[in-house]
Amino acid sequence: MDGPEGKQIESAEEMIGRFLGELNSQIPHWKQSLDQSPSQLEQIERAVHQSFARGADMLVAGLLAITMVSDQLQRAEQQTRKNYSRPLAKGRERTIAVRLLGGMFLWVTTLYCPPKKKRFGRDDKPRVGIDLTLAQFGFGKAVSPALQSQVARKVALCPSISFAHQELLRDGVQLDAKTVKRVTYQCGEGLLALRTHRIEQMRQGKLPVGDELAGKRVSVQIDGGRMKIRGPMRKKLKTSEKVDDDGLLIEDSPGRSRKVPKRTYQTDWREPKLVTIFIHDEYGKMEKKTKATIDGTLRGPDAIAEVIAMHLHRLGAAKALSVTFVADGAPWIWDRVSWIIKMAGLQNVETVEVLDCCHAVHHISLALAALGLSKEERNPLYRQHRTLLRNGQWRRVVEELSSLQREDDPIDALNTETSYLRHHGEAGRLSYVSFRSRGLPCGSGAIESGIRRVINLRLKSNAMFWTAENAESMLQVRSQVIPDQWDKAMVELAEFRRTVAYDGYQWTPVETSCKSENSHSTAT
């Protein structure tokens, strides 16, 4: 802790003694300050907590020093080297600086093993080695697991990285803003790499199957959000200044004195796809004391379909009592449900497709609005047909709305809405009476809430523009924080880093739409 050439730490007791010495020297100062000005209690209380945070780091350093020379750790290192996903070369010792939760720098000597080089031919595998010693403790890149967890979680919960940086400083975590950003995105990229690894395992039939959803009623709700993605930088085009009728410059025109940037970027709206998977009770509500699984991606419908299939497979949905898919009327969702069922192995499970009741009712309103009726004429018809639809009489709703069509001048918008209701009714997604009697959810409130809490409150805001990579990383981090799956995700990430070599998280989604010729062969 005194630098790379400093004295080696011998024991935890030694560090406790050093901390007590530092503490005894500070107590008189705190006592004097509080006697002179009792109103300074808040500042003194923070100073005391920061001192004890340093003391906690000193104790952790002592515990690490003891453990790193133990025979048990060396055996664990060799076991990790043996079971690593690719062959490793002979290790070499190196000294690197790592940071602990309280902000203390610690110089540790760790065993680093680079990957073995291929004797012949080109090596197209990741050229990423592993610090065997640090991997046993779950270290990230030069940060302890607790520090990585606190920083990434704080950034996910705060409205911006700058705000999170300020809050971390108030908590005694002395990091600069760039380090906070780096740690957060590295954590997110690690979680994305873990997800990609699981998808590859699912494709190969090697993904382990759990029992979390076994014997349960499962709801899968899917939807898309909105956020802005920042494009590449480009030169700012010059705009002509305003002139009057005589061709003279208008010196006091609005914005004339404002400095114009030389470079700018284009922003485009993108739709991140989100899914929430949870266990529901006999009333279609999420069971208490259970946690949802939330995930999302900006890579399109095929990518989110693979993500959904992967989660259903690994959580054991093939052993569930029923799996209910709930969504709005977006074709990209329903075109992929059959592929998800096949890939997740749900052929022997009762699967139900439900169109969110609120979206269905909204299309009745759109159909009546297309007729040009007044509010007084439209409202009674709307309430009548809304009740019929909720009672499962979608055929009568379609017939009565179609009977209002003009024969001489057909209204295209009315045909569109009635076709929408007929299509989903024939697909069995409007049988709300049957759904309620079987205890199935009829609404997509869970995913609407997920869109708001995961995306809108953090990734969608005025003047907030993301690069695609950072948005994907933040979406993954926030998807673990919001449903309270964070601690479990951190344990899984540490185990993944300890066993699997990875270089990036990108993967090429397969065709999953039922309209694609390749989707059926891929799922078999």
Image (tube, rainbow, N blue to C red):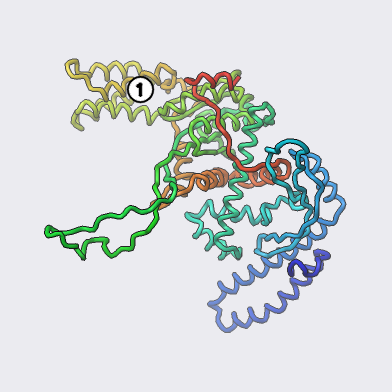
**Residue 52, position as x, y percentages in the image:** 68, 68
The residue most toward the right is 71
The answer to whether 516 appears left or right of 522 in the picture is left
**Residue 264, position as x, y percentages in the image:** 39, 53
412 versus 73 height, above or below: above
161 versus 368 height, above or below: below
**Residue 103, position as x, y percentages in the image:** 65, 64
**Residue 276, position as x, y percentages in the image:** 52, 36
Q: Can residue 436 be seen?
A: no
Query: Where, quadrant-wise, is the C terminus in this rendering?
Result: top right
Q: Which is more toward the observer, 269 or 383? A: 269
Q: Which is more toward the observer, 304 or 167? A: 304
45 versus 69 height, above or below: below
Q: Which residue is mark 1?
A: 420
Asked which quadrant contains residue 330, the reply is top left
The residue most toward the front is 120
Query: Where, quadrant-wise, is the N terminus in this rendering?
Result: bottom right
Rendered residue at 71%/74% (across/down): 23
Q: Which is more toward the observer, 443 or 51? A: 51
Q: Tag 1: Cα neighbours inside 10 Å, few (<14), some, or many (≥20)?
A: some
The answer to whether 237 appears left or right of 161 in the picture is left
Q: Secondary structure at mark 1?
A: helix
The residue most toward the left is 246
Q: Amino acid at mark 1?
A: Tyr
The answer to whether 102 appears left or right of 398 in the picture is right
Rendered residue at 33%/52% (across/down): 237
